[in-house]
Image (spheres, rainbow, N blue to C red):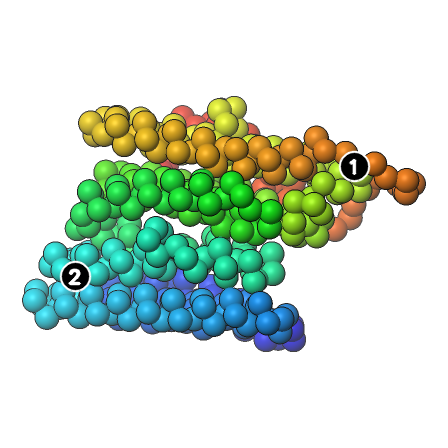
Amino acid sequence: MNPQAKLIFTISLLLGTAITTSSNHWIMAWAGLEINTLAILPLISKSHHPRAIEAATKYFLVQATASTLLLFSSMTNAWYTGQWDITQLTHPISCLILTSAIAMKLGLVPFHFWFPEVLQGAPLTTGLLLATVMKFPPITLFFLTSHSLNPTLLTCMAILSAALGGWMGLNQTQIRKILAFSSIAHLGWMTIIISFDPKLTLLNFYIYSLMTAATFLALNSIKALKLTTLMTTWTKTPSLNAMLFLTLLSLAGLPPLTGFLPKWLIIQELTKQSMAPAATVISLLSLLGLFFYLRLAYCTTITLPPHTTNHMKQWHTNKPTHITIAILTTLSTMLLPISPLIHPLS
């Protein structure tokens, strides 16, 4: 792709995200979401492969439908209450339609069907944008309207997302699809707490974005798209694979690592809200995700295939992206000890 075109699309992405996250009016938020959608489409389909074109088409159709529902929800609320302010969403039908629209934007169950297919058709760098940056504006709208939404509906959608994200990821061999179902499961954790402590949802999203960015950039650096490819990368870049191993365990939420922090705080808050059964169920469902993270980690570092090629191990590399991966991996694995500082800030 032309560098100038790529720069324009990237600036448009940042502009759309900034407009949506900083707006108080529904029309401005909708316009920001539309700019985002139109900017990411060329980045998805830039390889001109039929699967990439299919992914871009699916993405456009789903996002256009979600944007229409969001606009319809805000217009219905304005019709009944005369309010266009995002925080003044009070009409129950508008709240229900908005929940469906944002769930479709994010890829929450039962509107999850598009996300694994789109991520599978997109390059890894674009997949990183789809899994992190493109989810930030809808999460912001969730945050601003959390007091108006139905907690029971959100809890049901969250538990179903955690269940389906873990269950569907078990049988996958394509790494991008595994990460897509991982994203759906993490969205379940973000959604279950948003009615009770919206700041915890944002903290979970920030930490998830850190870990996902480290994972995607590491996979992009070693050019691994399937589990079979991942099994042969240890001999080439052992240090990078060791870092990827730790980041995957952090994504799984194992205790000494950063990924455990949001899960710990969410379970604590759910217990305070007398929702211990929901906390128990979503904790047990995260074990499904733990299985495929461990399988990825096993393929990354513990499997050593027989090879006859003698070559130097790349312990030291001068690529600038590796500095970014090093910083992100450090943050993805070592933030838990300073959690008493992070929690008050959130």
Query: For this rendering, which residue is in front, 37 or 140?
Result: 37
Give above or below for 12 relative to 305. Answer: below
Give above or below for 91 relative to 155. Answer: below
Three-letter amino acid code of the residue under disc 1: Pro
What is the number of the mark on residue 215?
none
**Secondary structure type for disc 1:** loop
Mark pair 1, 2: CA separation: 56 Å
The image quadrant of residue 120 is bottom right
Residue 72 vs residue 39: left or right? left
Give above or below for 195 relative to 129. Answer: above
**Secondary structure type for disc 2:** helix
Give above or below for 89 relative to 222. Answer: below
Task: Residue at 42%, 33% (x, y): give it.
Answer: 286
Q: Which residue is mark 2?
A: 94
Which quadrant does the N terminus fall into?
bottom right
Q: Nearer the viewer, mark 1 or mark 2?
A: 1
Task: Residue at 48%, 24% (x, y): give it.
Answer: 255
Which quadrant does the C terminus fall into?
top left
The image quadrant of residue 239 is top right
Residue 142 vs residue 90: left or right? right
First of labels 1, 2 by sequence position: 2
Task: Residue at 45%, 57% (x, y): give it.
Answer: 115
Q: Which residue is mark 1?
A: 305
Image position, residue 14 (x, y; %)? 47, 63
Three-letter amino acid code of the residue under disc 2: Ser
